[in-house]
Structures are given as C-alpha cells and as structure tokens.
Image (cartoon, helix red, strand yellow):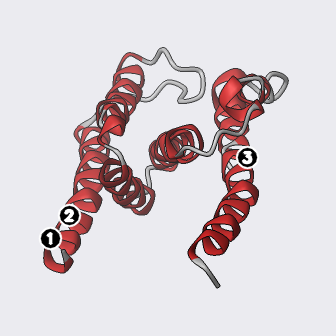
C-alpha cells in the first residue's frame, strides 16, 4: 500500500479508538463520585465529563483523550489505596503516575494531588472529622500506614524510572 493509503487507514483506526479511550474514564469518575458524593449523586461527575467539549467533539489529540484517563486513574488508585490501606494499590498508582508523567509532563500536578490525598486522609483520621473513616485515633501504627502508602507511590515511580533508564 502507498503511504497515503496507510495514513488514511491509521487515521480511520484512530477515529475509532480515541472515542473508546475517552469513555474509559467514566467508571473511575463514577466510582470517585460514589466515594465522595454518596450513592445518590455518584453519576454527576461522569455526566459532567460527558458534557465537556473535548468529549463531545472527539478531537484526535492525546491531551483531549488520554490525559484525563491517566489523571483520573491515578487519583482513583490513590483513593483505593488509602481506603483499603493497601500497599499494592499504592505501588500501582506510583507506576501509573510515572507513566503519566512520561507520556506528558503536564500531568506533574498529579504527584502533588496524590500526596495531598494521602495527607488529607491522614489529617482527617487524626482529627476524627471524616464520616467515612469514623473515629480513628492517630497512633504510630496509623501514621506508619500513611507513610507506607506514600512510600509505595514513590517505589512505583522509582521502579518504572529505573526500568526506563535501563531500557532507553
């Protein structure tokens, strides 16, 4: 096939893939909505996302399709890691966070938001103001748990960094 035929096939394939990728963010958004807004209002963030021009117009740019998915997945994994106090989700979020930054440096604020989420959850647990946490006393074990989650994020980022450094 000629070059222009290959280009036409590629653009046609992208025209089918990009809308699918941009819709993958709906489940994590509704899951985050359920976590923070309750069962009744869980669908609101997903509906607002569907009303955004970059979703409605389906532009064939990565920053309109892939970046929202990567950002929301990182935040979703951090919230799951904090809720379940699971180091595995923390490491997975670190891996995805580094991959997101590798894809686009404009996703660097996700690092600060990830650690802010862990820190705010710990602060609310310490003061006892979160309804989802209940009255949890901040002991050295709980403090270590939040520190461990932060280390898991850094470990995931570091592993992928070393892998990319070795391969590239």
Q: In the drawing, does residue 56 fall left or right of residue 132?
A: right
User: Residue at the spot x=22%, y=74% of the render?
Assistant: 163
Residue extending furthest toward the right: 40
Q: Nearer the viewer, mark 2 or mark 3?
A: 3
Residue at numbered disc 3: 23
Residue 42 position, x and y percent, is: 77, 28
Measured in 3D between alpha carbons, the distance from the residue under mark 2 to the one under mark 3, in whole angstroms, is 29 Å
Residue at numbered disc 2: 161
Q: Nearer the viewer, residue 10 or 45?
A: 10
Residue at numbered disc 1: 165
Question: Residue 94's mark?
Answer: none
Badge 1 crowding class, 10 Å Cα cut-off, few under 14, some 14 to 19, many 20 or more, is few
Q: In the drawing, does residue 89 fall left or right of residue 97?
A: right
Tell me the SS state at disc 3.
Answer: helix
Lower sequence index among marks 2 and 3: 3
CB within 8 Å, label 2 to label 1:
yes
Q: Nearer the viewer, residue 119 or 33?
A: 33
The quarter of the rendered structure image containing the N terminus is bottom right
Q: In the drawing, does residue 77 fall left or right of residue 60?
A: left
The answer to whether residue 117 is above or below residue 96 is: above
Residue 17 position, x and y percent, is: 70, 59
Tell me the SS state at disc 2.
Answer: helix
The answer to whether residue 24 is above or below residue 51 is: below
Tell me the SS state at disc 1.
Answer: helix
Q: In the drawing, does residue 32 fall left or right of residue 83?
A: right
User: Residue at the spot x=53%, y=30% of the render?
Assistant: 133
């Amino acid at each position: 096939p000629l070059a222009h035929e290959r280009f036409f096939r590629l653009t046609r394939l992208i025209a089918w893939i990009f809308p699918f990728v941009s819709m993958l963010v709906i489940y994590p958004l509704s899951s985050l909505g359920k976590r923070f807004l309750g069962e009744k209002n869980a669908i609101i963030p997903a509906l607002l996302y569907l009303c955004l021009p970059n979703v409605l117009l389906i532009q064939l740019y990565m920053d309109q399709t892939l970046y929202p998915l990567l950002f929301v997945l990182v935040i979703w994994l951090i919230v799951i890691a904090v809720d379940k106090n699971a180091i595995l989700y923390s490491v997975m979020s670190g891996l995805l966070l580094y991959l997101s930054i590798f894809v686009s440096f404009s996703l660097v604020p996700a690092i600060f938001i990830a650690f802010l989420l862990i820190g705010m959850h710990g602060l609310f647990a310490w003061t006892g103001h979160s309804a989802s946490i209940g009255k949890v006393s901040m002991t050295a074990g709980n403090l270590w748990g939040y520190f461990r989650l932060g280390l898991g994020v850094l470990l995931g980022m570091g592993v992928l960094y070393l892998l990319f450094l070795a391969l590239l």
